[in-house]
């Protein structure tokens, strides 16, 4: 579409017979002299004809029983499940808060003692004396290939 | 409306009569409304989403919402228009969530069938249809939406305004811009 005419909006409405009488007559006078509008009107009519030949695909079966059955299924669902009452969750919320608080409290008691107890067994693992052993660093006690 | 879509005495009733019966507890009246409108809604959603499964799912969702809203429904618009409003909102929501909205240049990566491939008129017509379908998928969503309502559903500007919640002036300019965009893509190919 290289050429444009500022009246092309009226052209489209003219094609659809949606202009009021006065505007339509005025536009028809314009159309007599405007080559751009004439050409576009021809193209739009061609396009309109093509729309008329579009295929009409169908659902292919009766949708009514499907819709009614689905509606039946949806309405059969218990409404109490669908309805949300926030106040019903209050006891559960209190219980949850109490449980978490107790957990945090007990946890803090445990972590308070932990530092002191952990050091002894950890150091024992790196003790140079083997468990039950009496010899420190005497090479003859250990076969060479095992060192 | 396809006659085979309706059955028995229900098909003689108007939409508003079916709605009145449904409001009095007649479920089969709602089933009749679904049968009448399912294919139009499905086609629209298929071209909006470009996916059959998604279109089917959204068509069902549209009908669920209609079922829930119908008991208090007031006929301020035609039932069909009102259904399109629900479907259109559903499609817009889905496309926004998927964020596949690609405002890249329209011609980029586009695979058009070659219009010169089939010399016969029938083949050429089929090619033109494929070109148009491909071009529609490349348009931005609000342009595709408004063109489908106008060119396929043949709704008036007032009805489209009702479906999309827009003033008629906005509908008018959006359709004009959408056509311009579509022409730019299809020019010389259709
Ligand atoms: Zn002009």
Image (tube, coloured by chain):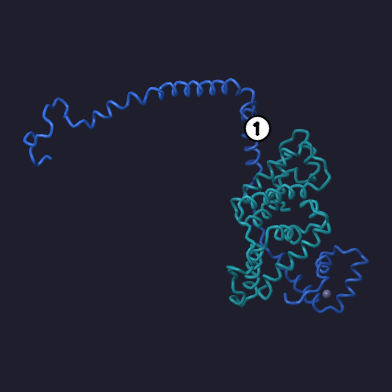
Chain colours: A blue, B cyan
Residue B69, percent across and down? 74, 39
Q: Quadrant of the N terminus of chain A?
A: bottom right
Does residue A17 appear to the left or right of B36 in the view shown?
right
Q: Which residue occupies the foreground of this view, A61 or B173?
A: B173
Residue A37, percent across and down? 81, 75
Q: Quadrant of the C terminus of chain A?
A: top left
* Residue at 78%, 65% in the rendered image: B176
Which chain's residue wears label 1? A
* Residue at 73%, 53% in the rendered image: B1
Establish whether ligand 1 lies closer than 8 Å to the Cβ of label 1: no
Q: Which residue occupies the foreground of this view, A95 or B186?
A: A95
Does residue B85 appear to the left or right of A92 in the view shown?
right
Q: Which residue is mark 1?
A: A75
Badge 1 crowding class, 10 Å Cα cut-off, few under 14, some 14 to 19, many 20 or more, is few
Q: Is residue B68 above or below residue A90?
A: below
Residue A16, percent across and down? 82, 64
Does residue B101 appear to the left or right of B172 in the view shown?
left
Rendering quarter of residue A85: top right
Q: Is residue A107 above or below residue B185?
A: above
Q: Secondary structure at mark 1?
A: helix
Rendering quarter of residue A25: bottom right
Q: Which residue occupies the foreground of this view, B29 or A99?
A: A99
Q: Is residue B56 above or below residue A97?
A: below
Rendering quarter of residue B126: bottom right
């Amino acid at each position: 579409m290289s050429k444009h005419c500022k009246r092309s909006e009226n052209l489209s409405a003219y094609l659809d017979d949606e202009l009021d009488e006065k505007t339509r007559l005025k536009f028809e006078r314009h159309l007599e002299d405007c080559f751009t509008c004439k050409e576009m009107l021809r193209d739009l009519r061609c396009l309109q004809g093509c729309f008329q030949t579009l295929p009409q695909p169908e659902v292919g079966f009766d949708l009514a029983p499907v819709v009614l059955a689905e509606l039946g299924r949806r309405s059969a669902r218990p409404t109490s499940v669908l309805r949300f009452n926030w106040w019903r969750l209050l006891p559960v919320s209190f219980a949850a808060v109490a449980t978490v608080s107790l957990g945090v409290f007990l946890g803090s008691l445990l972590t308070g003692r932990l530092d002191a107890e952990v050091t002894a067994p950890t150091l024992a693992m790196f003790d140079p004396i083997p468990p039950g052993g009496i010899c420190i660093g005497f090479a003859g006690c250990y076969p060479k290939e095992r060192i | 409306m396809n006659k085979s879509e309706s059955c028995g005495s229900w098909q003689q009733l108007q939409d508003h009569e079916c709605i009145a019966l449904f409001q009095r507890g007649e479920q089969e009246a709602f089933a009749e409304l679904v049968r009448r409108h399912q294919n139009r809604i499905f086609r629209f959603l298929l071209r909006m989403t470009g996916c059959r499964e998604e279109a089917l799912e959204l068509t069902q969702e549209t009908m669920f919402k209609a079922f829930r809203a119908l008991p208090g429904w007031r006929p301020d618009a035609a039932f069909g228009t009102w259904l399109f409003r629900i479907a259109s909102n559903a499609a817009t929501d889905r496309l926004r969530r998927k964020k596949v909205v690609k405002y890249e240049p329209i011609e980029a990566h586009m695979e058009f069938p070659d219009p010169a491939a089939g010399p016969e008129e029938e083949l050429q017509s089929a090619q033109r249809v494929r070109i148009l379908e491909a071009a529609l998928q490349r348009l931005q969503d609000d342009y595709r939406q408004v063109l489908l309502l106008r060119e396929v559903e043949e709704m008036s500007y007032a009805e489209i305004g009702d479906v999309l919640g827009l003033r008629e002036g906005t509908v008018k300019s959006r359709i004009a811009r959408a056509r311009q965009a579509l022409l730019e893509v299809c020019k010389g190919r259709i």
